[in-house]
Image (spheres, rainbow, N blue to C red):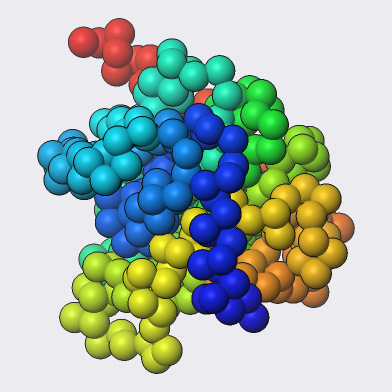
Amino acid sequence: MVSLQLVQQSNARIASLPKGLVALFIGATSGIGQSTLQHFAQHAPSPLIYSVARPATVASHQSFLASLHQSRPQGSYEVITADVSLVSEIDKVVDAITEKETKLDILFMSPGFMAFDGRKNTLEGLDPSMTTRYYSRLRAVQQLLPLLNNAAAPRIVSVLGGGIERPLYEDDLDLRDESHWSMWTSAFHPATMGTLALEILARENPQLSIIHWFPGPVSTPGLAKAREYGMVPPNQMALEEAGKRGAFLVTSERYAVGGSEAVQKSGGGIFLIDPLGESTDNEVLLADLRIRGVDQKVWKFTLDIFDECEVRAKRDKDEL
């Protein structure tokens, strides 16, 4: 267990990191992402922070970032308007970043929600709960690789279910069969597919530090909504602590490429991290999936989805 005291000591040293770190937060309009952004901004020297907000939350998020700027005026804080329940919207985010930056040091991704009301496909024909947890995240990583590779020590953190992956419906990865889809499978499929896809990208880009974090139950607005459906998980982490731990994950040398030997990578080359910052192991499942080539199948399927979304977006644009 990485104690909260150690986390806070490490976060205090963020001030000694190079000035002008460029960070992109996707999913930081509330919850773990917002708390992480806040704790990172409190310490980072002159950071350039971009944060994505869907249209309905832009105003409130701008107010939040304005308050950060008031307390830390040396930083730069910018909202990018996009609805990440649509894969095509991620390309708008990427364009906004690449127009202004030549590198990206930190990519922190925590969007998502529990689909209590069932599957309701977007205009792209995808389940939005799966898109926010998987497709849009991986599209962001894929499209931002050039900027990440230009950074001295690039780091990606995806907040979902590292270490608690589950078996997949391998012939129905998008859960289009109604008998396969449920609130839980729509959560575990993105987590498992996320680990496998991020492992592939880690092997292709060994200089990237990629972390898939399972924070456990955290007192977020999403968890508050879950209570309405009778879900009250025990031992909930306070949101403040989760944010401190999130900032720790994006900055600590413990998770750097070639960092602490105490933190082991998965067999596929990424950090699977438990709620309290330790490496976790799920090799019984993951090794089998790799051996059978399921990771490559997942990534090919994902690239095909991206192609379909690109075609649809171009067609829609042409029709305007």
In which quadrant of the rendered view does residue 292 lie? bottom right
In which quadrant of the rendered view does residue 16 lie? top right
The spot of residue 120 in percent (x, y) is: 27, 53
What residue is shown at x 29% (from left), y 13% (from top)?
317
Left or right: where does residue 61 sit relative to residue 113? left
Left or right: where does residue 291 sit relative to residue 252? right
Q: Which image quarter holds the N terminus?
A: bottom right
In which quadrant of the rendered view does residue 183 lie? bottom left
Decide: is 316 above or below 251.
above
- Can residue 147 be seen in this snapshot? yes
In the image, 203 versus 151, the foreground residue is 151
What residue is shown at x 58% (from left), y 24% (from top)?
103
Q: Residue furthest bottom?
A: 234
The spot of residue 231 in percent (x, y) is: 30, 85
Left or right: where does residue 123 sit relative to residue 196? left
What residue is shown at x 59% (from left), y 35% (from top)?
18
Decide: is 130 above or below 88.
below
Q: Which image quarter holds the C terminus?
A: top left
In the image, 188 versus 280, the foreground residue is 280
The spot of residue 218 in percent (x, y) is: 38, 75
Task: Count the labels in the image.
Answer: 0
The spot of residue 62 in percent (x, y) is: 19, 39
Decide: is 207 above or below 31.
above
In the image, 197 versus 1, the foreground residue is 1
What residue is shown at x 32% (from left), y 61% (from top)?
31
- Can residue 173 be seen in this snapshot? no
In the image, 65 versus 89, the foreground residue is 65
Decide: is 123 above or below 289.
above
